[in-house]
Amino acid sequence: MSLGYAEKLSYREDLGNVGMSELFDPSDILQSKIEELAKLIEESKHLVAFTGAGISTSCGIPDFRGPTGIWTLQREGKPLPKAEMPFHRAMPGLTHMALAELEKVGFLKFVISQNIDGLHLRSGIPREKLAELHGNSFREICSSCGKEYIRDFEVETIGLKETGRRCSDLNCGGKLKDTVLDWEDALPPKEINPAEKHCKMADLVICLGTSLQITPACNLPLKSVRAGGKLVIINLQATPKDKKAALVIHGQVDQVIAGVLKCLNLKIPPFVRVDRVRISLSFSSKKKRAMKWKLRISGVHGFKAPLPFLESVEVSFPDRPDLKIAVLKKQPFLLIRETLRSKSFIISVKLNFGEGCGCSSVELDFPMDSQDAMEDFDYGLENVIQSLRNRAVEFSTCGHVSPILRKRISESIGTFTDYAVVTSLVKHECIALKPVVLTSNGITGKRCIESLEDEAGDSPKRARES
């Protein structure tokens, strides 16, 4: 989980059981359990996945209760673990992508997550089939109309606070809030209601990488058991719900899920990260011979929104050696120049990517037209992204780029063009029981704590990360 998120949480002394011993099933027993789980999935009519921090540790995100978890180290007075990569560059791991494949082929009906890393959405799980009980560090919501905004940067606050941005709907304009809960916040009905509904409908709930200690979230899977469904727990530590489970698997979640998909003859899809950038070119000079222009490289979420994956921008002019090359190192990336109107030329923009990206840079060329004659277009965001993903998988490379749309800038002479860029590609393959990353751009209500001894009943107060 984001270390920044852990530091933003309100202080709480009682964090439940942390740092418990990890348990590992012998390899032959593990294989037998994997085959049993695959059969349960194949026979299920309504499968629900319930996930915790343990499925994201292989993505470079520390958990809370493991031997080197954030809360474990805090209790021991030790320094917090160092994140293996920037939080905003964390990518879905093998388990995330396997769940996305199970959803795609029709086995998985719904995902309930206690995580705030947004990796299920990135993996391709549809929003309508996902309940993020404790929020999403990359999601804002309008306090007036409820419209959601998914960001490529980590939202600055937690605790359902105003972020300083507003709804882009012209009929609304309401204030945006973060969606990540603090200890005292109640679980949002938009998340908890469908989660409860699907747990009651489920004939099989699989809990993955969660210690099931935080109520009321940890009691959701039991709603399936009470209705005659089966509960499966995959975790390296004992949980308060083990006795209720039809099957308990002590093994690495990635290893188990990789084995399950192999039994089901399913392949784990690759993850392709596509980021977006906006390049704006506007003219403001009224001189007859010269024109003053501004080149701005920004995020698609607004001029003031951060572009975390960009480290710097180089602007050059291939057919105009008389014009000085500019290197922009600080956001907002803005270049202001004045040139003669009579001379058209090409502007070359080199985007230098930061830590965690699978390629170092891409270069974009476009004409400087003093008459602003470039036509508007819109190729469709989803079409462009899917085309880029197909290319990235086909050639096993990052750096593919494509324009999405171009529009005239309101109340100004100029245009902005949105581009999509493949910045990361990760492929997974299963060899025996060990999942292997083949291609990677990086490192591979109130909340209540529930003890192992006592199983708490349902509570209307909020639950959170396990």
Image (cartoon, grey):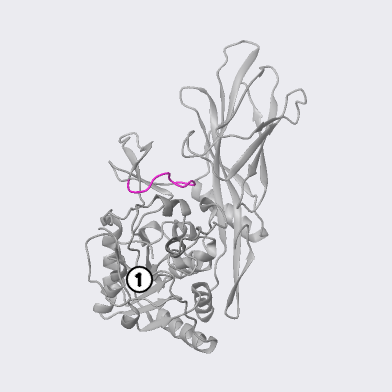
Amino acid under disc 1: Leu
Looking at the image, the residue that sits furthest to the right is 321
Residue to which mark 1 is pinned: 212
Point out residue 264 in the picture as x, y percentages from the top left corner. Answer: 50, 79
Task: Report the front residue among 457 and 140.
Answer: 457
Task: Report the front residue among 373 and 283.
Answer: 283
Magenta segment, which residues? 151-160
Magenta stretch: includes residue 290 = no
Point out residue 239 in the picture as x, y percentages from the top left corner. Answer: 37, 76
Q: Quadrant of the C terminus?
A: bottom left
Task: Report the front residue among 183 and 144.
Answer: 183
Q: Is residue 141 left or right of residue 39?
A: left
On screen, residue 452 above or below 437: below
Residue in the picture at 60% in, 55% down: 424
Camera sees residue 104: no
On screen, residue 410 above or below 192: above
Q: Is residue 135 left or right of residue 391?
A: left
Point out residue 164 in the picture as x, y percentages from the top left corner. Answer: 38, 36
Residue in the picture at 66% in, 44% down: 362
Point out residue 98 in the picture as x, y percentages from the top left corner. Answer: 50, 69
Q: Secondary structure at mark 1?
A: loop
The majority secondary structure of the magenta stretch comes to: loop
How many labels, in total?
1
Crowd class of label 1 (few under 14; some 14 to 19; many from 20; radius 10 Å): many
Magenta stretch: includes residue 157 = yes
